[in-house]
Image (cartoon, rainbow, N blue to C red):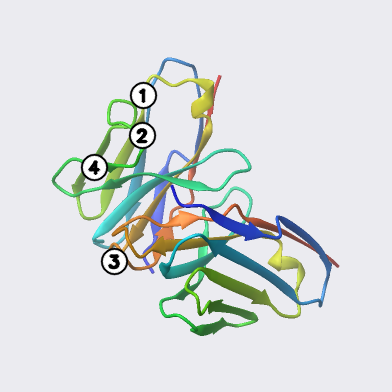
Amino acid sequence: GQQLNQSPQSMFIQEGEDVSMNCTSSSIFNTWLWYKQDPGEGPVLLIALYKAGELTSNGRLTAQFGITRKDSFLNISASIPSDVGIYFCAGQPRDTGNQFYFGTGTSLTVIP
Amino acid sequence: SAVISQKPSRDICQRGTSLTIQCQVDSQVTMMFWYRQQPGQSLTLIATANQGSEATYESGFVIDKFPISRPNLTFSTLTVSNMSPEDSSIYLCSVGASSWSEQYFGPGTRLTVT
């Protein structure tokens, strides 16, 4: 299957700091999604991206669809304690109709 | 987005038994999917649940082990058959308007096999 490399694997930051994480693939993707998963819960969709170069915001979160169509980035500005969780990217390759492949996740800890 | 519920939320089962997980959506949806998330890992697609026909399974997953039903556009079940400890995972259903659109997830079913 497709390999989605997500980095960093984990982050420990002070409250108020900005956060950046990214996801890269070996093939071209049509769609990128970013999710947040809290313990014991299902992933919650944060941002969906459909076009190369697209930059989309959701509150303090901003995500970009990379120009090469092989990567995506998620930024969180002015982090707060409730940002704690695991963030997953998901991408849909151009040559498959259905499947989204998920990254390995970035575990975010915010220190008050 | 749709409201998705799953039953049970968690269960502890003995090896060799089977468990059926239900996924209910509050509105009709075109696409329904089942994922597995092993402890501390990412999500892996098991199958696409097709309404009125057999599910489409991904590589490594077979119907005998994970039979799926989808009798209508709001409901699906996943059965984990003849369970072993390796089946201990979170099982998640997701829904989407189309095969290429964003997916929304249910809360998951946490399964432990002893």
- Foreground residue among A4 and B17: A4
Report how far apart the C-alphas of labels 1 and 3 lie in the structure: 29 Å
Q: Name the residue under label 2.
A: B61
User: Residue shown at 54%/69% (left/top)?
Assistant: A71
Q: Residue B81 carries which label?
A: 1
**Residue B33 appears at what percent x and percent y?**
34, 50
Note whether B5 is above or below A65 in the view shown: above
Q: Residue B97 carries which label?
A: 3
B37 relative position to B82: left or right: right
- According to the image, label 4 marks what residue? B55
Where residue B17 sits: x, y (%)?
40, 18
**Mark closest to the chain's N terminus, 2 or 3:** 2
In percent of width and height, residue A105 lies at 62, 55
Sequence-wise first label, 1 or 4: 4
CA–CA distance in space, label 3 to label 4? 17 Å
Which label's residue is closer to the chain start, 2 or 1?
2
Mark 2 touching mark 4, by CB under 8 A? no
Q: Earlier in the sequence, mark 1 or mark 3?
A: 1
Q: Please name the amino acid that badge 4 sits on.
A: Ala
Q: Would you call the spot at circle 1 few (<14 residues within 10 Å), some (14-19), or many (20 or more)?
A: some
Secondary structure category for the residue under label 3: loop
